[in-house]
Image (cartoon, helix red, strand yellow):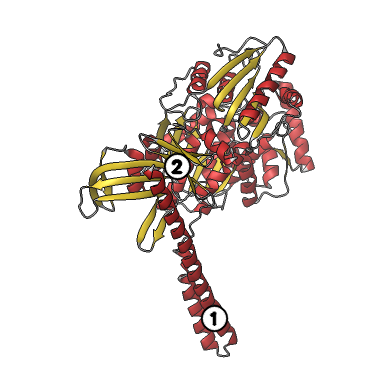
């Protein structure tokens, strides 16, 4: 196995370069800082104001040449300096045979490039777009280059230990301190997570396919709409695309003026590790959290939020957006929260929200009392309306940091479950260039109270400003058998050409007690077989979460009731909170035809539940199954 010895030596050499580079950088920074301290001391000791001024100017000039600006620290917390090797045979004799290491960050060894950043598309495109043995023709540094790709290997390194080499013909893997050839031919993302003991989103930069790479590196900075089925990489492509834009156009896409909005806190936490590696200081948050901070920037203070709102669903009506514009045109600005109550008191707003006269009267009475009491308690359904109201109250060209005409780029994930006002507020927060990446799949819309026409109208609005639509067709997360079952439920065709094989099993039981016992046996077997895996028991009703969790008391690795975390173990969760995340195994609890009825929302919920599983799906039930779930 000469290739293993060769690559182990290469890794040792690279690690030495990293250490030497860090030492040289620290020495340069120390000299710079020492000179700064020396100048500052001279300035303090000087008794001549002219000399003090000269020294102050020298200090400023010295600061302009701070080596931190150009000597970037090689950040490799995972001990994985590169993930791929490509070899070329270029027709230009001055280049000839050459190998490149592709990593998440560039590394220089003096004047020589030791590792090429994957975001240097001119070089990395050879890895993503070509297969070994193919001729290439690319423009690199302004010159046409052609030749033959003679090597394309994926490299697995963790904590500076080489453990995997994938060539087009062989896979070498380190298992229990011994190397095996072709021991594992395919490693799922769930396998990678289990090995790391961390089931958050993994960086797929080594696995990006040509279509994904084309989307990521597309030469456009306007609005991009990414759609596709579950597990096709919409969120991951969006994150990598923003990282690419920030790297290649840092003045147009400033990290502190970019924003990533996720569907909920679970999804935010799921992408946190990868987003921090890719985007640095860029804020990644939920819409609710961002909107509250945006309100603060717009001058809204001393408000209290509550989840309790009996009219919350009605306030998601898409008609509210147009009514709000009408109201702003007819009235003057007052205290923002009183402005909100006054908007709700308008006859045309009440008529749009309620058809029943008694409901109109009750709502109107409640709003009038809020105005009298100067009530400052708003529901989360009110927050998006209040935010949009405050934005509209500002001049169209006004810039409010973090709230209006501010962001260089915003990613909106799971946009199909946002209402018209939320989407309008996000759009208004972008700079005049209106640079957005919108990720959505209408087959995964799961919030019945959100008026779907809002998203449709939002998409049409973006099309008028030159929306680029991209569709990801290939799903990578779930096993072929799981995807085929999900396709029967959703009615959506699926491309399983790149899918791994997995397990789908049905367990019909006589009653709920027998089903609970079966679930416990399955969980105990899975935990014993794969202690570093993450298994989720997914049910539709929150009451079932409590029952199932109690029945699993004492099982090793059982996390808290209803809790979603990404450490190895066992979760019992509700369907609504797991959209966008992945588990090694899923046990679907009693997906009966009464739980998942033949409505669009229920079909979408079932589709989401099924496609959370990467390797194994177990369906445990005692009632007739929902349509599409046939054994």
Residue 249, relative to residue 47: is it above or below? above
The spot of residue 451 in percent (x, y) is 58, 27
Dot 1: within a 10 Å radius of its alpha carbon, few (fewer than 14), some, or many (20 or more) residues?
few
Front-lying residue, 281 or 171 = 171
Report whether residue 405 is seen: no
Return the disc, 1 or 2, that comes first in the chain's sequence. 1
Q: CA distance from mark 1 to mark 2?
A: 45 Å
Dot 2: within a 10 Å radius of its alpha carbon, few (fewer than 14), some, or many (20 or more) residues?
some
Q: Which residue is mark 1?
A: 38
Element type where label 1 sits in the image: helix
Q: Which of the labelled discs sits on residue 205, or is there none? A: 2
Q: Quadrant of the N terminus?
A: top left
Residue 490, relative to residue 330: is it above or below? above
Q: Residue at x 41, y 41 (%)?
A: 154
Report whether residue 132 is seen: yes
Element type where label 2 sits in the image: loop
Front-lying residue, 354 or 28 = 28
Q: Which of the labelled discs sits on residue 361, or is there none? A: none
């Amino acid at each position: 196995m000469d290739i293993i010895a060769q690559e182990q030596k290469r890794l040792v050499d690279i690690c030495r370069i990293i250490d030497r580079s860090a030492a040289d950088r620290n020495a340069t920074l120390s000299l710079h800082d020492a000179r700064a301290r020396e100048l500052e001391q001279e300035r303090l000791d000087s008794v001549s104001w002219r000399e003090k001024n000269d020294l102050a100017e020298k200090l400023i000039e010295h600061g302009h040449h701070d080596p931190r600006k150009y000597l970037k620290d090689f950040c490799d917390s995972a001990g994985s300096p590169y993930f791929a090797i490509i070899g070329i045979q270029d027709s230009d004799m001055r280049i000839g045979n050459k190998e490149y290491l592709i990593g998440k960050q560039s590394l220089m060894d003096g004047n020589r490039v030791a590792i090429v950043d994957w975001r240097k598309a001119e070089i990395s495109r050879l890895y993503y777009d070509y297969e070994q043995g193919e001729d290439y023709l690319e423009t690199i540094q302004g010159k046409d280059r052609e030749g033959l790709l003679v090597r394309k290997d994926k490299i697995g390194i963790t904590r500076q230990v080489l453990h995997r080499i994938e060539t087009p013909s062989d896979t070498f893997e380190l298992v229990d301190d011994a190397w095996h050839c072709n021991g594992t031919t395919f490693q799922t993302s769930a396998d990678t997570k289990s090995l790391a003991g961390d089931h958050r989103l993994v960086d797929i930069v080594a696995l990006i396919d040509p279509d994904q790479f084309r989307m990521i590196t597309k030469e456009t900075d306007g609005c991009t709409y990414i759609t596709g089925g579950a597990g096709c990489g919409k969120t991951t492509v969006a994150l990598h695309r923003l990282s690419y834009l920030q790297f290649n156009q840092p003045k147009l896409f400033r990290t502190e003026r970019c924003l990533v909005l996720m569907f909920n806190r679970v999804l935010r936490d799921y992408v946190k590790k990868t987003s921090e590696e890719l985007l640095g200081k860029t804020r990644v948050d939920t819409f609710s959290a961002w909107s509250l901070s945006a309100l603060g920037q717009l001058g809204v203070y001393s408000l209290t939020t509550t989840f309790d709102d009996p009219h919350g669903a009605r306030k998601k009506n898409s008609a509210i957006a147009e009514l709000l514009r009408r109201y702003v045109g007819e009235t003057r600005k007052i205290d923002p929260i009183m402005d909100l109550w006054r908007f709700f008191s308008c006859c045309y707003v009440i008529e749009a929200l309620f058809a029943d006269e008694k409901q109109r009267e009750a709502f109107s009475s409640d709003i009038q009392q809020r105005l009298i009491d100067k009530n400052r308690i708003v529901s989360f359904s009110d927050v998006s309306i209040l935010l949009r109201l405050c934005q509209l109250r500002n001049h169209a060209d006004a810039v409010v940091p973090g709230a209006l005409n501010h962001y260089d780029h915003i990613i909106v994930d799971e946009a199909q479950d946002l209402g018209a006002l939320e989407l309008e507020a996000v759009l208004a927060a972008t700079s005049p260039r209106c640079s957005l990446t919108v990720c959505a799949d209408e087959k995964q819309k799961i919030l019945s109270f959100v008026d779907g026409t809002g998203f449709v109208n939002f998409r049409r609005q973006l099309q008028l400003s030159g929306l680029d639509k991209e569709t990801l067709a290939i799903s990578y997360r779930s096993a072929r058998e799981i995807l085929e079952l999900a396709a029967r439920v959703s009615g959506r065709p699926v491309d399983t050409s790149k899918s791994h094989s997995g397990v789908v099993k049905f367990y019909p039981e006589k009653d709920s007690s027998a089903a609970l016992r079966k679930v416990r046996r399955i969980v105990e077997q899975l935990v014993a077989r794969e202690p570093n895996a993450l298994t989720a028991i997914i049910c539709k009703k929150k009451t079932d979460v409590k029952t199932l969790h109690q029945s699993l008391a004492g099982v090793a690795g059982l996390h808290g009731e209803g809790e979603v975390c990404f450490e190895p173990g066992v979760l019992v969760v509700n369907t609504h909170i797991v959209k966008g995340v992945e588990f090694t195994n899923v046990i679907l609890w009693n997906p009966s035809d009464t739980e998942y009825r033949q409505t669009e929302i229920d079909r979408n919920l079932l589709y989401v539940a099924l496609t959370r599983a990467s390797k194994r799906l177990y369906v445990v039930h005692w009632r007739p199954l929902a349509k599409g779930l046939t054994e």
